[in-house]
Image (cartoon, rainbow, N blue to C red):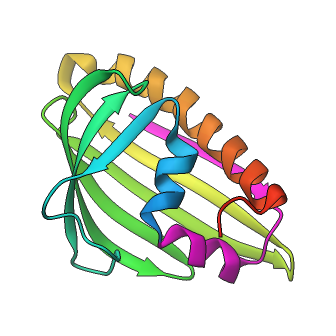
Amino acid sequence: MIVQKSSIFPASRDVVFQKLQRLETLQAIAKPYATFEPLDNAAAVWTVGSKSSYRLRLFGLIPFGTHAIRIVRFDPEGICSRESNRHVPVWNHDILLVPIDESHTEYTDRVEIKAGWKTLFIWLWAKVFYAHRQRKWIRLLKEGEVQ
């Protein structure tokens, strides 16, 4: 199943891409729906080919196993990651960044989810999660909270 959500961000594509490179941004926009605690092999900087693992908790409380992220593409036009954990073997996440003008970017999350019998439940959670993430992104960009 596919989850796709787009929003207009109040920042240039370069600013959004710069912030995408930081784990702190992921941690800020994911809360409170998910928390990501880096494990030993977590990459300090995401680059093509990098592999990282995180202790994932839903709502900061419910252990959801180790979440692995492998970066396939990472450039100002977007990011492509192949992610998985024991509950969701396939979580293919693409982020597309399309400049609108000097201070606005169309941001799209597109996620392919395959989790067997759990797919529908994970898909429903992901729809809410990505809507939350994009609202949080917009707020953080407007308030300048993510440097």
Q: Is 115 left or right of 79, judged from the image as shown?
A: left
Identify the residue at image location x=47%, y=69%: 22
Q: Is residue 4 magenta?
A: yes
Q: What stretch is highlighted in magenta?
A: 1-21
- Quarter of the image with the C terminus is bottom right
Name the quadrant containing residue 43. Answer: bottom left
Q: Is 120 left or right of 137, judged from the image as shown?
A: left
Identify the residue at image location x=37%, y=44%: 112
Identify the residue at image location x=55%, y=49%: 28
Q: Is 57 left or right of 125, judged from the image as shown?
A: left
Give the mark count.
0
Q: Is residue 70 magenta?
A: no
In this rendering, is residue 135 above or below 103? above
- Quarter of the image with the N terminus is top left
In this rendering, is residue 25 above or below 116? below
Q: Percent from the top left, x then y, of residue 140?
A: 72, 54
Q: Percent from the top left, x then y, of residue 5?
A: 62, 44
Identify the residue at image location x=42%, y=34%: 34
Q: Percent from the top left, x then y, of residue 90?
A: 23, 43
Q: Percent from the top left, x then y, of residue 67?
A: 22, 45
